[in-house]
Image: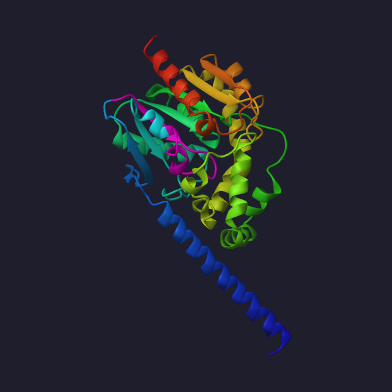
């Protein structure tokens, strides 16, 4: 056999091994983090994974996870903390967790699908809580249908255009073919300690709570299709927020924002502070010294924001 054929054979063997290892890891991740809610079909035929908690007659609130997330982020601490007195709906954004992806990957299309899914299971107006990218989704929800949203709770929410380009990591993953190959390799070969370290870095200057990484099951987000979708959404978010910004002053519904002063992922002064200036009804609480994950490390501060919104809606 010639050297060229040997190289081709080794390359094909590496590809086959990578795919098999990645598929096995994906199957293990799904067994460890099974679907726990229901698959809700909208009138337009889209499907969304929705979990329900709390009394049916309690005030309804929808929880939307951020980038690379799933329902497993919101159900670790926040949903249980709210479920004693709220009707909590936790959703997987399209293409994440157990919700199928959409052909239209825009924030607007995601939100329309989530709105339609929630409308099929909850006839009342809802409060919407979003974390990080999910906060941008919450704002888009209000811009699309302000009259049918009770109010928003924004947690470390992305809301405004920022300087600079997306990281090389996400630009590479968002590149056709190259990104797909990169995603399969990451799924197959990134060791668990590296994932644990990366998750802990998102919490900085705090640390991930004990048990969070095991509960969150990061390899759900490492599935190649999810990785590349997440990268494309991160790359395009800046422009979508730029288009949303001029409409923020039209928002009059009550908004409670909580944002850590030490958040280096979604900076307070770039996002939450300008939003509070743009929207008269936005009440911003600065969480001193906290990073990007207050719903995990300061859960009661986030619950308090939901309670404040409820009180405002009741006129108290």
149 or 199: which is nearer to us?
199
Q: Is residue 116 above or below residue 14?
A: above
Q: Quadrant of the image for the C terminus?
A: top left
Q: Is residue 76 above or below residue 225?
A: above
The picture quadrant where one finds residue 288 is top right
Can residue 96 be seen in this snapshot?
A: no
231 or 27: which is nearer to us?
27
Q: Position of residue 168 (x, y in %)?
A: 70, 49
43 or 234: which is nearer to us?
234
Q: Is residue 237 above or below residue 245?
A: below
Query: As drawn, which residue projects farthest toward the top?
Result: 316
User: From the viewer's perspective, is 97 left or right of 125?
Assistant: right
Q: Which residues are magenta?
A: 58-78
Q: Position of residue 171 (x, y in %)?
A: 66, 49
Q: Position of residue 139 (x, y in %)?
A: 50, 28
Q: Quadrant of the image for the N terminus?
A: bottom right
Query: As drawn, which residue projects farthest toward the left?
Result: 57
- The residue shown at (47%, 21%) is 305
184 or 42: which is nearer to us?
184
The picture quadrant where one finds residue 122 is top left
Can residue 18 be seen in this snapshot?
A: yes
Residue 64 on the magenta span: yes
Q: Position of residue 72 (x, y in %)?
A: 44, 43
- The residue shown at (72%, 33%) is 163
Query: As drawn, which residue projects farthest toward the front?
Result: 210
User: From the viewer's perspective, is 26 left or right of 54?
Assistant: right
User: From the viewer's perspective, is 211 left or right of 261?
Assistant: left
Residue 210 on the magenta span: no
- The residue shown at (36%, 32%) is 88
Scheme of image coloration: rainbow
């Amino acid at each position: 056999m010639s050297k060229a054929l040997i190289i081709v054979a080794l390359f094909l063997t590496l590809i086959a091994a990578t795919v098999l290892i990645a598929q096995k890891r994906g199957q293990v991740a799904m067994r460890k983090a099974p679907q726990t809610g229901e698959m809700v079909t909208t009138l337009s035929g889209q499907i969304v994974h929705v979990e329900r908690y709390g009394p049916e007659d309690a005030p309804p609130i929808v929880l939307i996870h951020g980038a690379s997330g799933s329902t497993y982020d919101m159900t670790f601490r926040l949903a249980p903390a709210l479920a004693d007195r709220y009707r909590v709906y936790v959703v997987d954004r399209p293409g994440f967790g157990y919700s199928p992806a959409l052909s239209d990957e825009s924030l607007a299309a995601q939100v329309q699908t989530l709105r339609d899914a929630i409308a099929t299971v909850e006839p009342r107006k809802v409060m919407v809580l979003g974390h990080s990218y999910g906060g941008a989704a919450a704002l888009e929800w209000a811009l699309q249908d302000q009259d049918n949203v009770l109010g928003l709770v924004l947690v470390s929410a992305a809301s405004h255009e920022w300087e600079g380009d997306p990281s090389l990591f996400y630009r590479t993953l968002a590149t056709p073919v190259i990104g797909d190959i990169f995603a399969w390799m990451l799924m197959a070969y990134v060791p668990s300690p590296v994932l644990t370290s990366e998750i802990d870095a998102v919490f900085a200057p705090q640390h991930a709570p004990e048990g969070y990484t095991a509960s969150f099951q990061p390899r759900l987000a490492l599935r190649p299709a999810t990785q590349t979708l997440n990268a494309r959404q991160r790359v395009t978010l800046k422009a979508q927020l730029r288009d949303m910004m001029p409409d923020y002053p039209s928002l009059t519904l009550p908004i409670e924002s909580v944002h850590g002063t030490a958040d280096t992922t979604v900076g307070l002064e770039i996002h939450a502070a300008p939003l509070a200036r743009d929207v008269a009804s936005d009440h911003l609480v600065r969480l001193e010294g906290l990073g990007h994950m207050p719903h995990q490390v300061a859960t009661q501060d986030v619950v308090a924001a939901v309670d404040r919104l409820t009180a405002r809606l009741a006129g108290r």
